[in-house]
Amino acid sequence: MQSTGVYRVDKAEKPPKKHRKLKRFLIFLLFLLICFGIFIYIKEHLKPHTVVHQSKPVITTITDDQKLKTWNEPDFVIKMPSTWTAVPIPPHTYHAYTWTSGETAGAEQLTVYEDTIPGNFSVNRVVIVHSEDSKVVLDGSASDNCEQYTISGAPKVGEFGVPAKWQGVEFYCDVQNQERDIIGTSSLEGPNIVTVTNDIRTSHKFLFTLDNENAGSPNYTVFYNAISSFEMK
């Protein structure tokens, strides 16, 4: 009797399971090494090359004109340029302290009137101020020459200027004298007056003026700094 048989093609024998795991591990390890190499390349070769330069230190040189000297008066202290000198107080009805930029023609004079203040003192430019604690605070910079915005006219009898306003504050404009550029302070209290009170509640009235005899540009910096440095004792 003829036998019948079933023929099959045998599949290739698979490698052991342990070898397959090792092969997968090696492939994964190779993949990690490739990724790490790409990361190092990008980090070292593709990042921008920035050179940081340390900035040079800023050195401020103080010249003689910039040095300040503190003047210790009976009721207040004030700082003036070291090159300015005090002017002896002449015997007059006003209690005032004056400093000058020099003895030659064209020198400027800064004066601080205390309590005995010329009420009708007229100026060409005004600086509005107010008191805060024991100091004087600037409310902006100096005005333009008041002749430009004040109606000209003859002053009243006994007065040297005509009433004017700057920033809503009254003062007296010297419309008849343009040879010298005089700057003065005023406040909401009235023309030429600002009252300052110290820590023990003692009060004094003050007026600050800058007389520019050479009719040139006034030294606003000196005037502003002096007012800002002023402090009652």
Image (tube, rainbow, N blue to C red):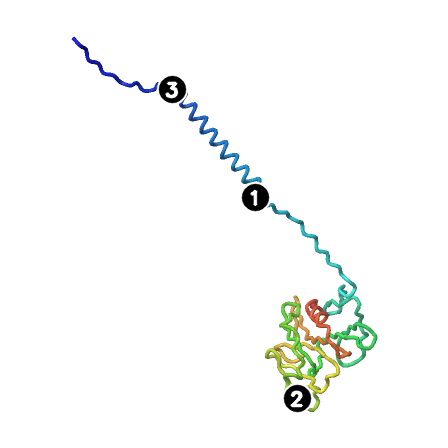
159 is higher (above) or lower (below) than 166: below
User: In terms of image quadrants, where is residue 28?
Assistant: top left
Which residue position holds label 2? 152
Q: Nearer the viewer, mark 2 or mark 1?
A: 1
Q: Under tag 2, what secondary structure?
A: loop
Q: Quadrant of the C terminus?
A: bottom right
Which residue position holds label 3? 15
In the displayed structure, does residue 168 sit left or right of residue 29? right
117 vs 150, nearest the viewer: 150
Mark 3 or mark 1: whose residue is earlier in sequence: 3
In the displayed structure, does residue 27 sit left or right of residue 108? left
Q: Under tag 3, what secondary structure?
A: loop
Q: Residue at coordinates 51% horizontally, 34% vertically from top-left?
A: 36
Mark 2 or mark 1: whose residue is earlier in sequence: 1
Which residue position holds label 1? 47
User: In terms of image quadrants, where is residue 128?
Assistant: bottom right
24 is higher (above) or lower (below) than 131: above
Q: Amino acid at mark 1?
A: Lys
Q: Nearer the viewer, mark 3 or mark 1?
A: 3
202 vs 69, nearest the viewer: 69
Q: Quadrant of the N terminus?
A: top left
| Measured Cα–Cα span from mark 3 to mark 1 | 46 Å
Give the percent coordinates (x, y) of residue 185.
67, 76
Q: How many other residues sit within 10 Å of disc 1, few (<14), some (14-19) or many (≥20)?
A: few
In the displayed structure, does residue 47 sit left or right of residue 231? left
